[in-house]
Image (cartoon, rainbow, N blue to C red):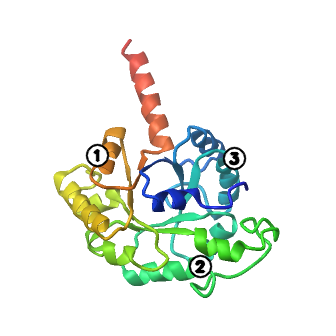
Amino acid sequence: MSKTINPFKQRLLDGQKLIGGWTLSGSPTVAEAMAFLNYDYLVVDLEHSPASIHDTTPILRAVEQTPTAAVIRMPSHDPIAIKQVLDQGGMTLYFPFVESVDEAKAIVQASMYPPLGKRGFAKMHRAARYTTREDYPTAANEQVCLIPQLETVEALALAVEIGKVEGVSAVFIGPGDLSMTMGLPGQVNHPDVRAKIVACVTACNQAGIPVGTVMPTPDDAKWALDVGFSFVSIANDLANMLGQCKAHLAQMKNS
């Protein structure tokens, strides 16, 4: 585990625009291969993938030997799951479906050591390098990067309040679930969906709150950066693989 600081958080707070990948396969090999492409960060999805909390360590080991920063999308807000991922060495965490300021505060409480939070303390775990990092508790509170995902119209309306919660580093807009809650399932580029997104990003930018998202294509990702997003992932490993396989198959069948 070579990285003692959180490069994602450092670059985010420096105001850099970050381009990420996304892995849904749950495979350390795929995560490692993608990370060697030098994305700024790679989201490891534990919410919508076959990977579980217990798969985090091998995936982190694979990614940490590359220049790419690992971001873990949590499966829930469960304090035990949060503690386990942090103990395994996760430093940047996405949290799905955050709907209120109180939920954001609870996430911070579960993720930070006292006095900032109530995270359970142990010395013998991977994040502390198995007791060899004596400064780990202080460094952990400084380097942890917590990012609530806002995935409904109601949550987007609270984006600035949620983003201002002490301990929250940024917010994330989930365009897929947002489109579902607007009665436009999967239509992330629908004008009404984009209007809601732009209004939220504008409000967050004015408040100095970084905002991230995921987009299906490079053109969509460029649009997101142009309207003010700070960090954007492009598609995911399975979508990219199947898209290429589908194109190859169609080419062969039509030749």
Going 49% across and 42% down the picture, which residue do you hit? 238
Residue at the image point whose x is 51% and y is 47% from the top = 40
Q: CA distance from mark 2 to mark 3?
A: 26 Å
Give the labeled residue for mark 1.
223
Eyeballing the image, is 200 above or below 175?
below
Q: Is residue 230 left or right of residue 202?
A: right
Can residue 108 be seen here? The reply is yes
The residue at the point 58 percent across, 76 percent down is: 111
Q: Position of residue 33 (x, y in %)?
A: 61, 39
Q: Name the one closer to the observer, 199 or 27.
A: 199
Label 1 or label 2, whichever comes before in sequence order:
2
- Marks 2,3: beta carbons within 8 A: no
Label 3 sits on residue: 65
**Can you give x and y, in whole percent of width and height, for residue 20 in the image?**
47, 48
Q: Amino acid at mark 2?
A: Met
Q: Residue furthest top?
A: 255
Residue 188 versus residue 160: which sits nearer the camera? Answer: 160
Badge 2 is on which residue?
A: 112
Residue extending farthest to the front is 14
Disc 1 element: helix
Give me the disc on residue 13.
none
- Spatial CA distance of label 1 from label 2 is 34 Å
Can you see residue 99?
no
The answer to which quarter of the image holds residue 198 is bottom left
Q: Quadrant of the N terminus?
A: bottom right
Q: Residue at x 39, y 63 (%)?
A: 210
- Mark 2 element type: loop
